[in-house]
Amino acid sequence: MPSIKLLSPRLANQIAAGEVVERPASVVKELVENALDAGAQRVDVDIEQGGAKLIRVRDDGGGIDEADLPLALSRHATSKIADLDDLEAVASLGFRGEALASISSVSRLALTSRTASQEAASRVEVEGREMDARISPAAHPVGTTVEVRDLFFNTPARRKFLRTEKTELNHVEECVRRQALSRFDTGFTLRHNQKVLQSLRPASTALDRERRIGSLCGQQFIDNTVVIDAEATGLRLWGWVALPTFSRSQADLQYFFVNGRVIRDRLVAHAVRQAYRDVLYNNRHPAFVLYLEVDPASVDVNVHPTKHEVRFRDGRLVHDFIFRTLHRALAEVKPDDHFRGALAQSGDREIQQGTAGASGAGGYPAPASWQVPGSLGGRAPQDGSPQDRSPQDIGAGHKDWQAKDQMAFYQSLNQGGGVTSDASGQAGINAQAPTIPTPPMTDGDEPPLGYAIAQLHGIYIMAQNRQGLVVVDMHAAHERITYERMKRALDQQDIKSQPLLVPVSMAVSQKEAALAETHGQELQQLGLLVERIGPETLAVRQVPALLRGSDTEQLVRDILADLIENGQSDRVEAVTHELLGTMACHGSVRANRQLTIPEMNALLRDMEATERSGQCNHGRPTWTLMTLTELDKLFLRGR
């Protein structure tokens, strides 16, 4: 073995650079974070050749004194923390004091800075090999500019791992996007090869913040989001979560910030995934921009060199708070929230802003009357013939629409009563089926989903509202209504356990056996009685009554895996809800069931009152809207 000796400062910094500086985007991240910590109100980022040739970050922050310039490029030199107490409650983005030293060891770095108390600026230059700092006077306003040229010029092995210019540029753009999302009070500019790619002014108002979100994440995202802001037990969660209908094929639009720091955390990801569990279609991913504010002392940001990961002092509290907040926000989504996104995408801005005139929604003439038995009438054709009913009359109230009328309808559906088949095999409502009155017509009190006008092929309900045509999948809608009722009924009673005639013996690891023993009481609350009968053996003696036919051993193994991974498990709830979803699917109104107009209206009203009614429990949409603008385009009206 060779003798032990100290590494040279250059080699030590290059090793550290391997942790901090992965690619040009890593350099941009560190320099922009330093600018934000310095109180910058404006940050300009210029790069050339994807950042391999030049990275320049300029800010108008507090600047650095001339005497501190050489020290700023030394390893583990920082102005952000001074003792252990500061480290235990880090409030800044950077604090290790090694970013500039690491960057300068693999590039040609120049730092120019001036403070408000200085008459002139100073410039310090360092090259990777010797790392001797050279200081000279310079012209510069208050603030700091850092230039990084020829990244990895002295480490060819690292340079050859850089991707194409376009790929590296994409990573830099994503980095700037994250920083711009984290600080609305700061303006950002990104240029590549002297071409402006992004220019963002400070966003001080709620409207400005939404505009920045729309610019960075797409206008469709902001048009299909729910704004949340919740506080509890010293935690605050605010931001934008997308409607389940705006799901993604991959997790490419998910931004989560803790005290302004963008992070990727398994605990947070699990809480979000759990909140969206029964409203997303197979293998789809939610979209969100969320901000969590916590006491800096309750979160450890010093667990990863790039500071992308954090550790919460009370992870379970944070997990439950995020889950409850998002779960409640998604449950409270109403059809109006969906309409806002649909109208924005279709261009019906006047309808979206509630400025529809008397001539019809969005300034369009009211449509011709649909002569369907039980329909609500409509608008006159454009030839000027008299209207059967004014657009205001379409907004019919249903204050006398009592719950007992809807209950009679659902009893009819669930009991299978009131259904007959004629000689042609078509289903219909017999004379003994409950008769539900059509809701009264009053001005200005139209429900979001409007009123039914017809049924298509025994599958879809056609309804009209002020915005246009609403098409409802009656089976999917009734499935969600039934599912939510079954969940509420289950929540109002404890989980029933059923003893097993023959206990299930399981061979597990010692870690899993100890975990089951430690969490025995929690497992029992889930309806599971699990006992440790050996160092590596468990016996399952009771299971939830609803899950008595499921694979007991696999269920317990999955729960233990969740406990190891997240410290808690919702596996029993997930499996139970899956079972309830299957029962709701089989118990809902089937295709080709002919409904009367009052029955269709009853279904629409219940959809408006049911949580998560925009999707069935498989994540498929239950209804869609075709606006008058979209319909007019189909028929080339107004051209």
Image: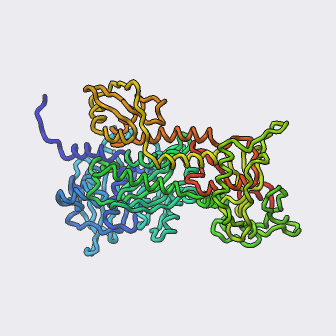
The location of residue 400, given as percent across then percent down, is 68, 65
Q: Outermost residue, left direction?
A: 3
The location of residue 102, given as percent across then percent down, is 27, 49
Q: Residue at x 30, y 51 (%)?
A: 314
Q: Is residue 243 left or right of residue 427?
A: left
Q: Residue at x 46, y 43 (%)?
A: 164
Q: Quadrant of residue 359?
A: bottom right
**Against 517, is 223 above or below?**
below
**Against 557, is 271 above or below?**
below
Q: Is residue 458 left or right of residue 351?
A: right
Q: Could one spot residue 192 in this view of the protein?
A: no
Quarter that holds the C terminus: bottom right
Q: Could one spot residue 345 in this view of the protein?
A: yes
Q: Residue at x 69, y 66 (%)?
A: 397
Residue sitting nearer the eye, 408 or 280 = 408
**Against 506, is 376 above or below?**
below
The location of residue 529, given as percent across then percent down, is 35, 34
Residue sitting nearer the eye, 248 or 99 = 248
